[in-house]
Image: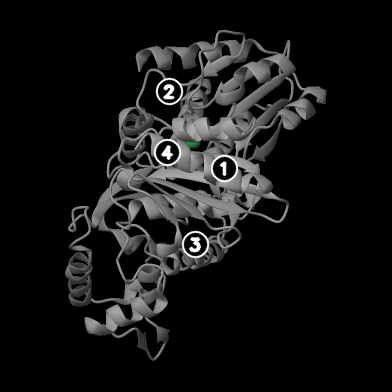
Amino acid sequence: MDLFLSGIKEAVKKFRQLPKKPIRIISQLDADGLSSAAILIKAFSREDLNFSVSFVRQLTYSFLDELKREDYETFFFLDLGSAMLKDIEKRLKEKNIFVLDHHVYEDYKGEIINLNPSKSLNYEDVSSSGISYLFARELNEKNKELGFLALAGALGDNQERNEFFGLNKIILEEAVENKYIEVKEDFYIFGSRNRPIYKALQYCFEPYIPGVTGKEEGAINFLKEIGIEIKNENGFRKISELSGDELKKIIPAVILKRIGSEEEPENIFRKAYILNNNEFNDLREFSTLLNACARLNKTSLGVSFCLDKEKAREDGTKILDEYRNKIGKSLEWFYKNKDKFIEAKNYVIINAENNIDINIAGVVASLISHSNVYEKGKMIFVMANNVIGETKISGRVSGGKDVDIRSKLVKITKKIGDYVSGGHSVACGSTIPQEKENEFIEVATKVLSEEE
Ligand SMILES: [Mn+2]
């Protein structure tokens, strides 16, 4: 950890020596990437530096070629770049390049300032927004106020297991000490205090409540069964309107529903990270909001949510609704077709075609992997395509077990062509042309069965 931190100090030192010229920021289009970029935007503005920002879902050769033609001298790659360090260096010769990323990288020795903890720290220890935060804080103490963004990114990348670890933990402790964040024990679904009760349950993806999650009717019936009125004279009742007794009814009922799921059934409490001075005061909900902005391609709105604490709550809620509806529909499709997928002992391939929006394929894959549908350790591949002929493959491991699914995906995609696969050992992705779908499935079945 110390070695990594001294690397950041060193990088900031070098950064300070550069002429004050406009900076080019390229960041990943997800919650971690949005938070990372927002942190540096704030930090650079503080230093009176100019910059321009782009978000991409994947770094491609053609995008690098475009960057090559731009006349910036300093480039920041956030939450991406690790898989292409040599390509970046080759195309952006003589430029000052900083890569703040935590994805796995091949051995690299070159000119790029590569702030990547993946070889020295655990995956859970820090996200790219954490690295960006540490960089910003080293640049200027005032950036300490941005710790919540570092943690929003870490949450977005699933680094929290009801507690933070490593550098994330240190960042949280600092934020708590400075009164930016307060930690409380809370019931899972309370991220959504202002929604109708049945909607909160229907959209409660974590924990997954069998028969209720993703099912409007299921959620309504569940509440009826335990004797909770879903409506009153003002319309649908909200979580915040429930009495203490009613809450006491819901919790054991949820636990009961979850008995039989492999996970500890009583594991429905978790820490809530309450933000001071933010309209969206639950950090998990805020992180989900950033995810939603990313998936719905609302990047500038996402950045403005990060930087502008007064930003209307209504905007955020609307986006979250749109997002959760999409997820709900995808999950509904999944459960309806559960028996139709290509499944073996150690893997399942879910070819959703256009039934799942390509932009939320990863989220849906994660939710499936956290539910109790498949046994622990099973590799889950979700395939989804879009109208421009791309197919995205998202890989996750059921139950979060430590199985290296990324190396499998790399092996498969390499066999069918020269496609980049990125990610982490338990969460990875790749994009292939749609006409390669059948070939992918064929090769995947072979590769994954061999290793059964
Ligand atoms: Mn990340």
Q: Which mark is residue 327?
A: 3
- Which of discs 4 and 3 lies nearer the camera? The answer is 4
* CA distance separating discs 4 and 1: 12 Å
Q: Residue at x 22, y 59 (%)?
A: 261
Q: Amino acid at mark 1?
A: Phe
| Quadrant for the C terminus in the image | top left
Label 2 or label 3, whichever comes before in sequence order: 2
Q: Are marks 1 and 3 in contact (CB under 8 Å)?
A: no
Left or right: residue 437 versus residue 260 is right
Q: Which mark is residue 118?
A: 2
Secondary-structure class at tag 1: helix
Q: Amino acid at mark 2?
A: Ser
Q: Nearer the viewer, residue 264 or 35?
A: 264
| Disc 1 target residue | 440
Label 1 or label 2, whichever comes before in sequence order: 2
Q: Which mark is residue 155?
A: none
* CA distance separating discs 4 and 3: 28 Å
> Is the residue indicated by label 4 positioned so its CB lies within 8 Å of ligand 1?
no
Secondary-structure class at tag 2: loop
Q: Nearer the viewer, residue 119 or 134?
A: 119
| Disc 4 target residue | 448
Left or right: residue 305 versus residue 74 is left
